[in-house]
Image (tube, rainbow, N blue to C red):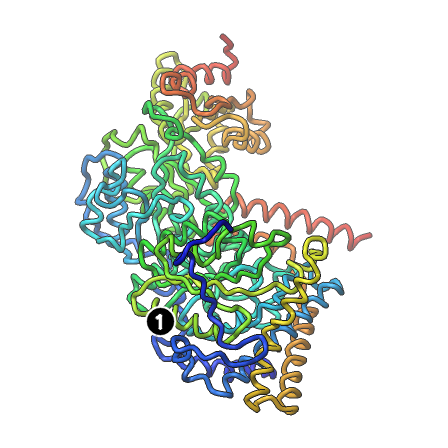
Amino acid sequence: MTMTTMMRPAASALLGQTSGSGGSAPRPGESLPGAPLRTPVPLAGTTTLTMAKAINAGLRQAMLDDPKVVLLGEDIGLLGGVFRVTSDLLAEFGARRVIDTPLAESAIIGTAVGLAYRGYRPVCEIQFDGFIFPGFDQIVSQVAKLHYRTQGRVSMPITIRVPFGGGIGAAEHHSESPEAYFTHTSGLRVIAVSDPQDAYGLIRQAIASDDPVLYFEPKRRYHVKGEVSPELGAPMERARVVAAGTDVTLLCYGALVSTAKDAALAAADEGVSIEVIDLRSLSPVDYESVEASVRKTGRLVITHEAARSGGLGGEIAAVVTERCFDYLEAAPVRVTGFDIPYPPAKLESHHLPDLDRILDGVDRALGRQR
Amino acid sequence: MSESFPGENPVNLLQLVSPEGARVASETADPWLDDVSGADLVALYQDMVVVRRIDTEATALQRQGELGLWPPLLGQEAAQIGSARALRADDFVFTSYRENAVAWCRGVGLTDIVRVWRGNAQSGWDPYSVGMATPAIIIGAQTLHATGWALGAQHDGTDSVAVAYFGDGATSEGDVSEALVFAASFQAPVIFFCQNNQWAISEPVGLQSRANLVDRALGFGIPGIRVDGNDVLAVLAATRMALRRARTGGGPTFIEAVTYRMGPHTTADDPTRYRPAAELEEWKAKDPILRLERLLDSLGLLSIELADQTRGLADAAAAELRAGCIGLPDPEPLTVFDHVFATPNATLDRQRAEYAHYLASFDSTGGKA
């Protein structure tokens, strides 16, 4: 033992008040390795739920499973969130676990970081996509980087729920698709859900993850109903084929999964077989599934609401071109929102990819120019 | 300031030891120091001397090319030692990057203190083994982390306290205001310990605030204490008061420790470009170590033996720091990919494999050539 390490206990004798709780601050871990996922779950068998209610059921189950799961957000308590995703959770779990916060997004994320430091699994609700930017620094500089910065000693099992996308005729800052800012940020997992069943399974997987997860909820699909069972579904980093096909691979996520499926049905009438893949995970992208499909079809269309330049579609097109160049029959095609600020409600139908624009993209991938 | 009126903005600087080393009696603060013995005063003194020596050695290591950068704490020893020595092991501190004396008190290894500044890692120590988070370079961000940790402690039903260390410049950051809002709203057991060292790189505190920084706290509904940050006893007493409040459910306290950054912002800075020399001279007269030395002398506690012993401790710490620093091995190249995620990530695993393959290609050709 060196002299310096010897002297420090002597100096700390001053502490005098060392009694108290004693010991050192708790180290998270022992009680929450990956948060146990228990069965059976109170979601009794298969039931029909809206996506909003399915997420609610997933949150509830996660809170039942692990007392360290806490929710933070604006208006998430008595109101149940502006989309009612957290309805009734305050009554069931109390104000210490369903925390109505002051209106400060950076603080919602930043206090979640502190809670995670202490072993909690915070789930933050950002009220609308366009409101996430005041919290951007805490997400990018702290949430995403702390595991790396601390050489794995501190985990950030934080889930950040973000209602995203357009199509609801909303005011400005309420219809944005900011996912590419986060897929460009190392250290984050980014997922987007598309239907009630997947939303249920993925919120539970996101909360159980030891990595931070941006969980994007397509707000125009909140009230669409579907069958929901207590299943967790495929691992959250995997894409899923939602319609098998042989002629063109169509990648989509979030609200556009439904549109893409409609496009596949319409194309089938014209004898074109589209394979629709719901990416689910935007970071990391499940390139294994994407490549397998492209090797089969030789043609790729990617659609998202977010602006084209610097968007996820460009990155996927680049990777697929690098890895599947010899299989491609045509250049990958992007069908996306324009490089514009989100437009006024009466113009949003021009900005958002719809069935016809997706089919136009499919035509281009097939070399059928109009 | 414009004309002031009776009763407005009362300012009471808590000072228990004058710059001349005289003990200033305080009916309200003295009871908080009843248990502080002569040996404790000596220990505080030795802490301050040792951390100043560590600071000097680290600056030398930077000048010699062994560290990329170093943020000196010269002049802020009392603020950091007085506050950190008041804490318990189960408390948790969230600091900025200049709190090397706080790290010392928390038991951080000397080599671990400079690991970041040598460029070997983004953090030096295990936060959970010392109750101190990895320092925040983003100004003010850690005040929110402290508040969140305090919320967790509150929910857990413990009486542990979080302490956020930040500077005068940080008080202009939105995160600090948001942290004060949250801490007040939830009455979180957190102490906002602001070291007002008068300068944020080249910007004087007057640019950040027209009022005393502590006055801001009141607007958030948080009690504030303005303390002489170069007076280790006053800082200790103030921190103990705030800790008592936090431990007993009284919520947050804002402490403004008025001190002075006697050195540059970092070793890359040149304060002669923006700071009048006379100001430094003025603060040198209020040096925190000199002041305690004078008090110890007046109490008959300062001896040649103590001076020798203290110098020995400081030199040993400096030698340990130097040896540990120079002995740090360079990290292995592929560790650049480590710990980005806690769980496997296919995209990153592929990049790691590709880069490993690339590096290996040099090994084979180099071997044959």
Residue A151 appears in the rendering: no
Residue at 46 percent across and 59 percent down: it is A154
Residue A226 position, x and y percent, is 24, 32
> Circle 1 sits on which residue?
B244
Furthest-top residue in view? A370
Pointer 1 chain: B
Camera-side residue of A209 and A342: A342
Task: Using the image, determine if residue A174 lies above or below residue B132.
Answer: above
| Left or right of residue B152: residue B104 | right
Residue A131 position, x and y percent, is 40, 37
| Left or right of residue A90: residue A14 | right
Camera-side residue of B52 and A270: B52
Camera-side residue of B229 and A282: B229
Crowd class of label 1 (few under 14; some 14 to 19; many from 20; radius 10 Å) = some
Task: Using the image, determine if residue B291 lies above or below residue A282.
Answer: below
Task: Using the image, determine if residue B96 lies above or below residue B80.
Answer: above
Residue A264 position, x and y percent, is 37, 20
Task: Using the image, determine if residue B57 lies above or below residue A176.
Answer: below
Query: Under tag 1, what secondary structure?
Result: helix
